[in-house]
Amino acid sequence: MINMNLTKRQEEILFAIIEEYAELATPVGSVTLAKLFNVSSATIRSEMARLEDFGYIAQPHTSAGRVPTDAGYRHYVNTLAEQASDSDKIHQIAHSPDEEHGTDRGNRVLEVRISSQPRADFAIRGAVDSLVELTGNLGLATIGDQLYISGIARLFTQPEFLDHQRVQAVAKLLDNLEPWLREAAPGQPLNIFIGQENPIGKASQVSLIISRFRSPYSDRSYIGVLGPTRQNYAKVMSLVLRAGQMLEEALALK
């Protein structure tokens, strides 16, 4: 049973673990966190034990550090969404000036790539290709009745996919992605499916982040990324949402 009543420090430690793990791709230990929070390692270990009891973090067998679980990521993503009073402000929830600068640069890349295209399908493909470059994830979008996918090779360079079985699981998910998008029809401007939340490919340990937008092809077109659960959610959520918003605005004029 997940206990949602975390103390402020427990939540800060959880978020630090998620952000450190996203950047370094290695389990996060108490020594690193003790330096970050300026407290003893024993204090951090006690709080980490509570987070583990709650189901938000786990300890890999080969490491003394901890990694986030799907439940931990879900709590983190929900908190990011709550911090934004509306969808236009999600890009403001990045935690550091460096992340904000990176997101602003990403928005400019998307704007140039989308606005420079003479046709709607070119604009959508350009936006997907930009998301691949900016996030390192696989990018996808619906163009009419077709699903455009880019960045498979880029996705599989992530350290998570050194495991052949995980590559197979993701390949199986991709085989079923197009019919699932048609059936699920996510209803929010931004939808995040983390790890086992995915209706298909539950064992693939990936997250799907998609944004709905109106296009000449459909009022329910989608653009998004598929990547490991370990990623910079603040940045990726912002970029995917902005890509959908920019496409909707640009395609209304084409």
Image (cartoon, rainbow, N blue to C red):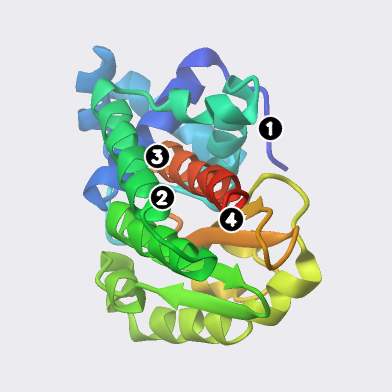
| Local secondary structure at mark 4 | strand
Note whether residue 181 is visible: yes
Alpha carbon separation for disc pair 2 and 3? 22 Å
> Does 137 appear above or below 81?
below
Alpha carbon separation for disc pair 4 and 3? 13 Å
Quarter that holds the C terminus? bottom right
The label on residue 3 is 1
**Circles 2, 4 touching at the beta carbon (< 8 Å):** no
Q: If you read the primary sequence from the N terminus, does the residue marked by circle 1 or circle 4 appear first?
A: 1
From the top left corner, tell me how far across and down residue 10 is, in percent: 49, 22
User: Which of pointers 1 and 4 indicates the residue nearer the eye?
Assistant: 4
The residue that mark 4 highlights is 210
The residue that mark 3 highlights is 235
Q: If you read the primary sequence from the N terminus, does the residue marked by circle 2 or circle 4 appear first?
A: 2
The quarter holding residue 18 reads top left
Alpha carbon separation for disc pair 2 and 1? 46 Å
Q: If you read the primary sequence from the N terminus, does the residue marked by circle 2 or circle 3 appear first?
A: 2
The residue that mark 2 highlights is 115
Q: If you read the primary sequence from the N terminus, does the residue marked by circle 3 or circle 1 appear first?
A: 1
Identify which amino acid the numbered label 3 is placed on: Lys
Identify which amino acid the numbered label 4 is placed on: Ile
